[in-house]
Image: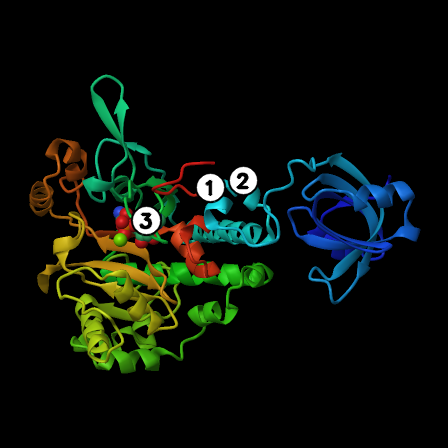
Amino acid sequence: TSAPITTISSLSAHEGQTITLRGWLYNLRASGKLLFPIFRDGTGTIQGIVPKAAVSEEVFNTLKELTLESSLTVTGKVRADSRAPSGYELDVESIEVLQRVHEDTPFPISLKEHGVDFLMEHRHLWLRTPRQSAILRVRATIMRAAAEYFDTNGFIRTDPPILTPNACEGTSELFEMDYFDDDKAYLTQSGQLYIEATALALGKVYSFGPTFRAEKSKTRRHLTEFWMIEPEVAFLELDGLMNLAEGFITHIVTRVLESHRADLKVIGKDIAKLEAVIAPDSSIEKNAVILSGAKNPEAASPAHTAEDLSATEPGGRPHDSGTSTFTNPPNRFPRLSYDEAHAMLEEAYKAGKLEAPHKYGDDFGSPDETYISSQFSKPVMIHRYPAAFKAFYMQPDPLDPTKALCVDVLAPEGYGEIIGGSQRIHDYDLLKSRIEQHDLPLAAFQWYLDLRKYGSVPHSGFGMGIERAVAWICGLDHVRETIPFARTLNRIYP
Ligand code: 4AD
Ligand code: MG
């Protein structure tokens, strides 16, 4: 045929015309002398209408017997239909089958419910279903928007090595391998240490790539292989880092809302929850109410008002760590110190809203994080955790050296930590003693210590796991659906 080849996503340009689509048979309903095939082509789905009288007998019979997920080209006339999800239906004229799925081996993913193990075992085919495709489209936008935020704010992308001689985030979660003769290599857990070096060369940098952790935890948040984007900035201190994280998340959510409302609907995400994240803030009052009950008066004070941020100037002096040098919305995400978060949990426990008390000095458990984040409609930043259970490289708080100048960003709706970051130790002797205290091999960290020997400056950065962000933004129960092929403790197939 001579009909133009097009895609389901661009049918609006072809209303009333006869066109050809290339794709797969997604579903088929027959009703006497009428067939209702649904075609998919990667860009969407469209329903065809095939009255027996309107096509040749051969076309009708071929389609009537066609098996799901058979590949084909279909030619037909595009008709607008406001009831159709895509806005159009196709009056089928002819089809050409490219590969017919054999009836003895039908497509394993039917439209009925399947167990998770079955679906993961058939992940290579599960990806074809509309919901999974929608998630992958949103993931792609999240990755693009994340890189775009840094690219358009003067950051240089510097990719760290995947094979490394030492640990970044603790030695227990390392994937180890032989590296020729007598050497060992480890799959990277984070590019941070390397981009600290590139930040001191280039000022503002980021890395974006796969990272690996031999996590023994079987939770809905943990993968053994995940993608992390990490900015690192010379002369940036903790407050500026929190501004950066806020601008970054706001940008990503804005981009997703710009172009994925239909996908989010297919996935089943409550879009209003995302709109609340980027909305000009009315919940500052709500936050203030909650914070006023907390211990540290500083965080409840107007330290984070619009006035404070009006000091922000694009391209401002980098030494102004309290103000931001990034395209940044006003401080709209609530910020709580560890102490304040602890106080909030204590009250919740007393009020019977939490099953177990949070022990001061311990990290927050999942139920703790879920409770805290459910108190806000925006991501919440928790800063200044006890240094005792945090990474060796974190700068101590000068006001209380038992605390680290670090921040975790908890996503709303109980999704927990999506970002972890900190100001880094810039003093040579302090860093050396921390490496020793953590029983890390000094020799492997010699180059890292060098960074504190040659023009050391305060610097900060964070890492965001893409899959955690996708899970939150799409509203998914488990990170296994956020990446094309999830690697977890008990699955490495397909
Ligand atoms: O908090 P983490 O361990 O921080 C770092 O790796 C720092 N070196 C980053 C930096 O400062 N440049 O990990 C950062 C983020 C977490 O907040 C989470 O989003 C994600 O990485 N993450 C995981 N995502 C999926 N599966 C896992 N097992 C993850 N572990 C961390
Ligand atoms: Mg963390």
| Residue 355 coordinates in the image, percent (x, y) | 24, 70
Residue 360 visible in image:
yes
Report which quarter residue 259 is drawn in. Answer: bottom right
| Residue 280 coordinates in the image, percent (x, y) | 43, 75
> How many angstroms separate mark 2 from mark 1 (CA)?
8 Å
Q: Between residues 445 and 45, which one lies in front from this camera angle?
A: 45
- Position of the N terminus by quadrant: top right
Please report contact status of discs 2 and 1: CB closer than 8 Å, yes or no: yes
At a point 19% along the width and 52% down the height, the residue shown is 458
- On residue 218, the disc is 3
Classify 287 as above or below 328: below
| Residue 11 coordinates in the image, percent (x, y) | 75, 54
Classify 467 as above or below 58: below
At a point 25% along the width and 37% down the height, the residue shown is 174
In terms of secondary structure, where does tag 2 sit?
A: helix
In terms of secondary structure, where does tag 1 sit?
A: loop
Question: Label 1 is placed on what type of residue?
Answer: Phe
> How many angstroms separate mark 2 from mark 3 (CA)?
22 Å
Q: Nearer the viewer, mark 3 or mark 1?
A: 3
Classify 197 as above or below 364: above
Q: Between residues 127 and 426, which one lies in front from this camera angle?
A: 127
At a point 18% along the width and 67% down the height, the residue shown is 358
Instruction: Return the disc, 2 or 3, that comes first in the chain's sequence.
Output: 2
In terms of secondary structure, where does tag 3 sit?
A: loop
Q: Which residue is mark 2?
A: 124
Q: Which residue is mark 1?
A: 485
